[in-house]
Amino acid sequence: DSGVTQTPKHLITATGQRVTLRCSPRSGDLSVYWYQQSLDQGLQFLIQYYNGEERAKGNILERFSAQQFPDLHSELNLSSLELGDSALYFCASTWGHNTGELFFGEGSRLTVL
Amino acid sequence: AQKVTQAQTEISVVEKEDVTLDCVYETRDTTYYLFWYKQPPSGELVFLIRRNSFDEQNEISGRYSWNFQKSTSSFNFTITASQVVDSAVYFCALSEGDSGTYKYIFGTGTRLKVLA
């Protein structure tokens, strides 16, 4: 158990819909990272938050947005969903910025039909 | 720009064989951090090791060992006497310490299949 909690674990929805994925970081961790892993693909960095502020952005689509709340949990919002958005979305946390290891949640598997 | 290359897409070995997974990285920073993660069929990502750029000592943990060579920008991972439970996708990752990019960049992964 990494201490990072992601909900929901599985989500099935239709094209054009909007979903919200939630992440609770490990106790004490200030940084939250979001990654997308499509089928048999590597991990694509989406976005990072540190103590409530956005600090780094990767290949995140404009249809996607995220935020980190004062209690440090984070949400990733995916809208106008397309079939290609079907993937495993991971949240990871670490104490600081990018010097320590990332602790990953179990992921949220999104299926868009 | 930072980049991690894992040229081996898939490797199959027979149980008890030794296997080395290659990782080559690119960075302009002098301070950086390298990581290996394991993703078993169940899907979770498990942290294996972290190494900073100032520590080139090789590390051994049980059947696992890591060889860090700055001269060739490589951070290779060897499993000795492989077991079926080692079957997984292994990812190498890099984060830079000087440029303030705050990103962890992952390689595309190497799928290891250990056959009984």
Image: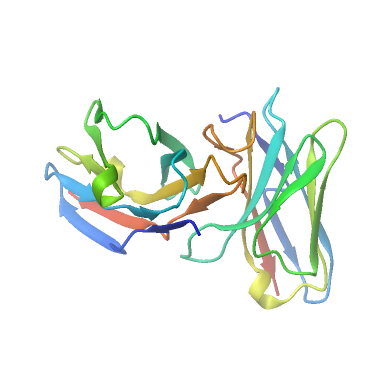
What kind of colouring is applied to the model shown?
Answer: rainbow
Q: Seen in the image, is A110 located left or right of residue B25? A: right
At a point 21% along the width and 40% down the height, the residue shown is B79
Q: What percent of the width, then of the height, locates residue B81? A: 14, 38
Residue B83: in sight, yes or no?
no
Asked whether A7 or B78 is in front, the reply is: B78
Q: Residue furthest right?
A: A70
Q: Seen in the image, is B12 located left or right of residue A52? A: left
Asked whether A62 or B10 is in front, the reply is: A62
Tally the marks: 0
Q: Which residue lies furthest to the top in this view?
A: A28
Asked whether A33 or A9 is in front, the reply is: A33
Image height of B105 relative to A24, above or below? below
Residue A41: in sight, yes or no?
yes
Image height of A61 relative to B86, above or below? below
Q: Seen in the image, is A1 located left or right of residue A40? A: right
Corner quadrant of residue A68? top right
Corner quadrant of residue A88? bottom right
Q: Seen in the image, is A83 located left or right of residue B85? A: right
Q: What percent of the width, then of the height, locates residue B51? A: 39, 33
At a point 81% along the width and 42% down the height, the residue shown is A53
At a point 41% along the width and 50% down the height, the residue shown is B91
Q: What percent of the width, then of the height, locates residue B14? A: 14, 51
At a point 11% along the width and 45% down the height, the residue shown is B17
Asked whether A82 or B21 is in front, the reply is: B21
Q: What percent of the width, then of the height, locates residue A97? A: 64, 36
